Amino acid sequence: MSKLRHQQRRGAQKKHARATSLNLVSLMDIFTILVFFLMVNSSEVEVLQTNANIKLPDSTSEQRPENRLVIAIDENDVVLQGRPVAAVAELVDPEMRIIPGLKQELEYQAARKGATPAAGFEITIMGDRELPYWLLKKIMYTCQHSDFAQISLAVNKVEAPGLDALGGGPGSADTAALAAPRTAGDAT
């Protein structure tokens, strides 16, 4: 008897069974939203890898940085492309104008790049906003003597609320001069 009831139930299930299907409309909606989200968030923002100890200064410059060698300076070390080249404590001597470890590594990087451009290679210095000027001056001097004369300083970009009222908006010559990389031939 149980076998007969089992067959009857199976027959009833087959009569009322519907074909299972996958609803592709909602799946396509989800993927469309995902693609749109990825397109919106993949803007032209360049991010420099920074150390948590380095607090970059703020700037209203409109000029975008380019991909180049980066010197990072914190309170303990001078680091070129993630490799420590000098300890800040050893650089206090006022007689030492060129940093030997940095010069050696820059010369190695210049040799890897090939022929030196007329204006020199490009480099970015990423230092804490409290970086002493004497240290920045030594680093820039060492860079210039190693054929890395186009020096840029890494900063956080901020909006300037009152520059337009003062006549110094984003397109003015004052702001452009702040953003331009310094070369060995600059007098200022």
Image (cartoon, rainbow, N blue to C red):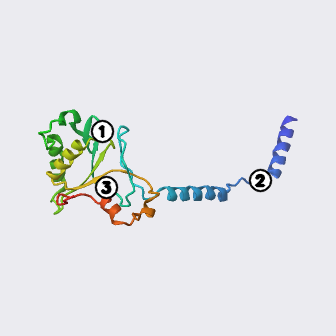
Q: Does dot 2 land on a helix, a strand or a loop?
A: loop
Q: Quick check: 159 left or right of 128? A: right
Name the residue tied to disc 1.
74
Give the x, y percent position of residue 21.
Answer: 70, 55
Gap between marks 1 and 2 measured at Cα: 68 Å
Q: Does dot 1 land on a helix, a strand or a loop?
A: loop
Residue at point 19% right, 45% down?
138
Q: Name the mark on residue 18.
A: 2
Circle 1 or circle 2, nearest the eye: 1
Q: Earlier in the sequence, mark 1 or mark 2?
A: 2
Q: Amino acid at mark 2?
A: Arg
Quadrant containing the C terminus in the rendered view: bottom left
Measured along the vertical axis of the image, is residue 145 above or below residue 88? below
- Quadrant of the rendered image containing residue 151: bottom left
Residue at point 36% right, 66% down?
172
Q: Earlier in the sequence, mark 1 or mark 3?
A: 3
Disc 1 residue crowd, few under 14, some 14–19, many 20+, Cα 10 Å: many
Residues at discs 1 and 2 in contact (Cβ within 8 Å): no
Q: Earlier in the sequence, mark 3 or mark 2?
A: 2
Give the x, y percent position of residue 19.
Answer: 74, 54
Q: Does dot 3 land on a helix, a strand or a loop?
A: loop
Q: Amino acid at mark 3?
A: Asn
Disc 3 residue crowd, few under 14, some 14–19, many 20+, Cα 10 Å: few
Q: Amino acid at mark 1?
A: Asp
Q: Name the mark on residue 67.
A: 3
Residue at point 13% right, 51% down?
145
Gap between marks 3 and 2 measured at Cα: 59 Å
Disc 2 residue crowd, few under 14, some 14–19, many 20+, Cα 10 Å: few
Circle 1 or circle 3, nearest the eye: 1
Residue 73 versus residue 116: which sits nearer the camera? Answer: 73
Residues at discs 1 and 3 in contact (Cβ within 8 Å): no
Q: Quick check: 124 left or right of 141? A: right
